[in-house]
Amino acid sequence: MMQGYGFAQYDSRFDGLGSMTFEEVSDTFGVQVENAISDLELPEDMDTQLTVLEIEERYGVSGQEIASYMVMNMQQLNTTLDPRERLLMRQQATQAMRTGRGSGMYFMRQGNCACGNFTTFNFNESGIIENFAVGGNLLFDSVEIPDFEYLDEQITETTAFYQGVDSQILIQDSPMGIFQVRAFANKTVTYNLADGVKASLEKNISSGLENAVPIKITANNFEGYLVFFRNPLTENPEGPINGTEVEISGDKITVNLVEYSVVMFRASPMQPSLMQTGYRYDSNHTYMHQVLNREIATGRFGAEIAFRAGSDKVSVTNYAPVGLKVREMDRDRIVLGVESDLPDGRVININLDNETINLTNPDRLRLRYDGAIIEEADSIDELFTDGNRPLCYRLYENGTASIAVYIPQFSEHEIIIDLVPEGEEGAADVSRTGEMASDEAESIGADDGINETEGQVSETGEPKAQNEKGDVESSPAFELGFAVSGLTAAYGLRHRK
């Protein structure tokens, strides 16, 4: 009997898996039997001498699902496998378990492994993230946060959140592969790079940032950055970061964080599919996201949102106290709400793909700010000159779009993204002056009222469901951060003991 369930090509121990008993399978791959039974939702009193095929027939849990579970959780590794082969196995296992469960961005959790369409990792309660991969690229063998003192966790759709006594870990399944470590006390974080991954200080885009110089991370034509900024949850979110230190030594990056600072990995947005090893970024795309990474450190980049595969599961990441929310979402029409108490303007970024909104003819895409067409900038740099009118800058590439919008002043505003009817592309009138757009915005957006139910988190820590306005439920990084004063509280979040 030679059931390899697609994994025997990597690891011969999967040969004949169907005829092995459940206990034998668990022992072979170093997975605790009790954990496997619980995670696979098998009966607690199940006879562990049943074979995989007998379990499939009796309980409906397929051999493919059991094999995939073992791939994502095995501790007894085949020493002949290289890191790339292990990652390929894990991605293949993820896809097998997703079959029939929809598309878009979201984490599937099996044991200590969280597998997303873009981001995959293992979490250890001692404060170690292992095998962190984005878009099919294994980037960090491990990321170590000392003295984490695990309290609890929450994994909800696109966001995985882990709470320690004086630090937090937040990871998102998004095209940017967001991975934040937030420190509420001085903390040293160590990144151990995977084979073939290189790191370097990116001083050419970081003039004046001093201790917040981004670190460029590259692997197999893949590009991302470690960036540093002040936690937007603090009482003074606009204050400078003083004292952060970084050292790169061989395959190790050591980051000394100070109180209320954040170190974050952010990739240039990936395509809406797995295995992007051979992907090359256009030079304009690369520069745009270099600038956005730099402006995270300055605090002028407020938030960004990502849509993929036409799914209603979106990820929101907040880099400053700027609220960003989906109010309406249909095919080819998205309405966003954005609000803040900050006195000055900020830039937000919107990541779309062709399955969410039709990008085959970019001239048809229309952006409106409080009802007025947004003036187009010639470069991303124009959005960070502190002007007095809304501006946008957008790039299209390989069925995706990155759209940055500058909001000159805050109360509550609405951004609508839709399509001009076919044959009426000129109606978008992107040549309108900023003065006209600004005047219209003032007349339409004068109401400063904020819907108090938007962006709240329930007492259990779960994001609130769709509100009366019809907002699409999302998993925002900022809103899941919890109050700093509640660090030692029991959050009542889901956790398997």
Image (cartoon, grey):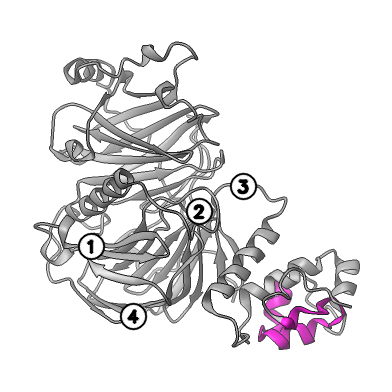
Q: Amino acid at mark 2?
A: Thr
- Marks 4 and 1, how far apart at CA: 17 Å
Q: Residue at x 40, y 60 (%)?
A: 221
- Sequence-wise, the earlier of marks 3 and 2 is 3
Quadrant hosting residue 325: top left
Where's residue 176, x and y in %?
Answer: 40, 54
Screen quadrant of the N terminus: bottom right
Judged from the image, the secondary structure of the residue bearing numbered disc 2 is loop
The circle drawn on residue 251 is 4
Looking at the picture, tell me which residue is in the foreground, 194 or 339. 194
Kindly identify which residue carries mark 1.
214
Where's residue 224, x and y in %?
Answer: 34, 60
Q: Is residue 298 left or right of residue 412?
A: left
- Marks 1 and 2, how far apart at CA: 25 Å
Badge 4: residue crowd in 10 Å (few <14, some 14–19, many ≥20): some
Residue 172 sits above or below residue 373 on the image: below
- Marks 4 and 2, how far apart at CA: 29 Å
- Sequence-wise, the earlier of marks 4 and 3 is 3
Q: Residue at x 53, y 45 (%)?
A: 313
Is residue 236 visible to us here? no
Badge 1: residue crowd in 10 Å (few <14, some 14–19, many ≥20): many
Where's residue 483, x and y in %?
Answer: 33, 59
Q: Specify the farthest residue to the left.
A: 208
Judged from the image, the secondary structure of the residue bearing numbered disc 1 is loop
Kindly identify which residue carries mark 2.
158
Q: Look at discs 4 and 1 and give the one toward the viewer.
A: 4
- Marks 4 and 3, how far apart at CA: 35 Å
Kindly identify which residue carries mark 3.
103
**Is there a contact, CB below 8 Å, between mark 4 and mark 2?**
no
